[in-house]
Amino acid sequence: MSEEKNAIEIKKMHKWYGDFHVLRDIDLTVKKGEIIVVCGPSGSGKSTLIRCINRLEEHQQGDIIVDGIELTNDVKKIDEVRREVGMCFQHFNLFPHLTILENCTLAPIWVRGTPKVEAEEIAMNFLEKVKIPEQAAKYPGQLSGGQQQRVAIARSLCMMPRIMLFDEPTSALDPEMIKEVLDVMTDLAKDGMTMIVVTHEMGFAKQVADRVIFMDVGQIIEENTPHEFFDNPQNERTKLFLSQILH
Amino acid sequence: MSEQTREYPVGESPELPAPNHQPGAVKWVMENLFSSIPNGIVTILGLAFLYMVIPPFIQWAFIDSVVLGAESRQECNAINPDGACWAFIYRRWDQFVYGFYPADERWRVNISFILVAIIVAIALVERLRAIKGIIWVALALVVACIILIVGFFGLERVPTNKFGGFMLTLIIGLTGIFASLPIGIVLALSRLSTLPIFSIFATIFIEFIRGVPLITLLFIASTLLSYFLPPGTNFDLLVRVLIMVTLFSAAYLAEVIRGGLAAIPRGQYEAADALGLSYWKSMRLVILPQALKISIPGIVSSFIGLFKDTTLVLIIGLLDPLGIGQAAIADVKWIALSNELYVFIAIFFFIFCFSMSRYSLYLERKLHTGH
Ligand SMILES: Nc1ncnc2c1ncn2[C@@H]1O[C@H](COP(=O)(O)OP(=O)(O)O)[C@@H](O)[C@H]1O
Ligand SMILES: [Mg+2]
């Protein structure tokens, strides 16, 4: 463990897609063990922001420091960061040609060099944690959406990340499957994982988030504790947004 | 809606067997062959055509044919003038198989074939991780070539211009297939590379090779290349042909595989990146297995094309089965037996190409994981 107090520090960060200024002057510090929920209208740059944290997207200005490592073009450092940061996607992105177990052991074996037997043991542990050990031999195509997303979470956890990023993990799921995924994420939060979660699940945000961040047109507009955020929003745009998602 | 199910209270509708979908033969015929008047007419015309073609062919190829006991076309005619003179194939069999490989050394060819056949069979059935399989087959081919050309301890060295017949077809076909697959993969990846040097080189290479007929490349291999090589170098013609055939096939494969790569969703690349897999590992473990699976039909079509194109080497003087056969039917003893010759060669190619086609279907089914 490094001595760093902060898991993630983003300072005066800007990003452009071509001429399009997608992230503007982002400042965000995430302490170890903190749970941050990010919300905001579609196209406001939420995905782009969290994808910058593990360098799926490159930022052009400012600094991003993850677990004490500054993200630059240095491939070694990018690899180091990616080993520490797990990510779950809206569409799960499991590897369809591999079984559930193989999905979970692939990165530990090939990135960390974990022996296969050990990697399988670790994988089974995490599959138990997400409550689907009995599906280990199946292929992703044979699982429901909720099960697939839980496998995706287990797959990330197998790399023993210190930080987990979630990009709308439940928005591609049928309503009855949302809870099973949120339950797994809640457990994870209780275990002390540092998490940044893009979601519009307000129940989840109220229950586990330390802070809620509201983004619009590439900026962080408002940042507050969940209760203040939902019950007493300051910004006009936040109010409008909340009124839309809460009906 | 069915009135019947309403008789049961909610939730107590019994499970009923599926309607019977196994009609009898007559029903099948009526439904599939005579379902309408035009359909019936087509069926009758088709049957008439088959009746006109198949019985005479069977008569010619099997019933009236002569296999043993004839030493020339005349003797065939004397026994039965209406049938196929398979005696021609029978007498020339060794030449069709081995070309002009010295008769006493032909066991070396047999050993090589058996070796390669075993390794290829294992690679195909086991589907060793693609790369391992290719390496094993490549090794087997190299060993086979050493046995064929140099032999071991004190065996006679056989120059490659003695190679011919099906042996030559198989050498060119198999080498082309197994060497072009890795090259095609690398070309496809290069073409998609974000580094311009790679993508430009790959694009030029692929477009050039695809834009030129194989025949032309073979001529370049046989004649033009000598001008570029330092004088006095004796660069084996067969090796030059192998290189050209491999490059030709690789260019086509590259495009087929590129199509497969394009079909892989971005999310797969991102998930691999997010897990920390390096470019090569993510290609090898995540992207290529999926892309190659999608490309199987295209890859196999390309291999079948390559296998048949090996007959073109005839034009630069290598004696593939067609070359051997053309020489054979110029012989006064067997003069002009072209029907027998081409039917025979057609059967040989059909067996190989059809096997490849079936294998590709088997592989597709085996790799299907339900998505
Ligand atoms: N690869 C890209 N190239 C160009 N524009 C993009 C790209 N990805 C996203 N964008 C644009 O950037 C903006 C922010 O996208 P995104 O971060 O996905 O928003 P959110 O996740 O908040 O819905 C959107 O307007 C989107 O159209
Ligand atoms: Mg998004």
Image (cartoon, helix red, strand yellow):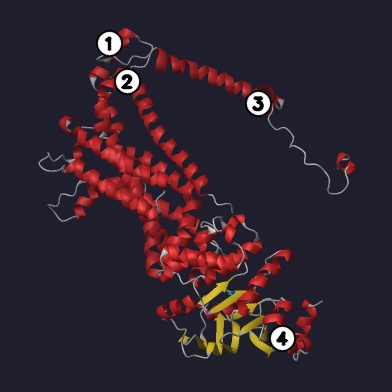
Disc 2 marks which residue?
Answer: B337
Residue type indicated by callout 4? Pro
> Looking at this view, is B171 or A145 the one in front?
A145
Q: Are marks 1 and 4 on the same chain?
A: no
Residue type indicated by callout 1? Glu
The residue at 49%/16% (across/down) is B55
The label number, if any, that marks residue B33 in the structure image: 3
Relative to A121, say whether A5 is above or below: below
The label number, if any, that marks residue A226 in the structure image: 4
Rate crowding at label 4 as few (under 14), some (14 to 19) or many (20 or more) other CA atoms within 10 Å: many
Disc 1 or 2, which lies upstream in sequence? 1
Disc 1 marks which residue?
Answer: B75
Q: Are marks 2 and 3 on the same chain?
A: yes
Marks 1 and 3, Cα distance to the nearest angstrom? 46 Å
Marks 1 and 4, Cα distance to the nearest angstrom? 101 Å
Q: Quadrant of residue B81?
A: top left
Chain letter for the residue marked with disc 2 in the picture: B
Marks 2 and 3, Cα distance to the nearest angstrom? 39 Å
Residue at mark 1: C-beta within 8 A of ligand 1: no
Dot in front, 1 or 2:
1
> Looking at this view, is B199 or A131 the one in front?
A131
Q: Quadrant of the N terminus of chain B?
A: top right
Marks 4 and 3, Cα distance to the nearest angstrom? 70 Å
In x, y percent, where is residue B86?
33, 19
Chain letter for the residue marked with disc 1 in the picture: B
Marks 1 and 2, Cα distance to the nearest angstrom? 13 Å
Rate crowding at label 2 as few (under 14), some (14 to 19) or many (20 or more) other CA atoms within 10 Å: many
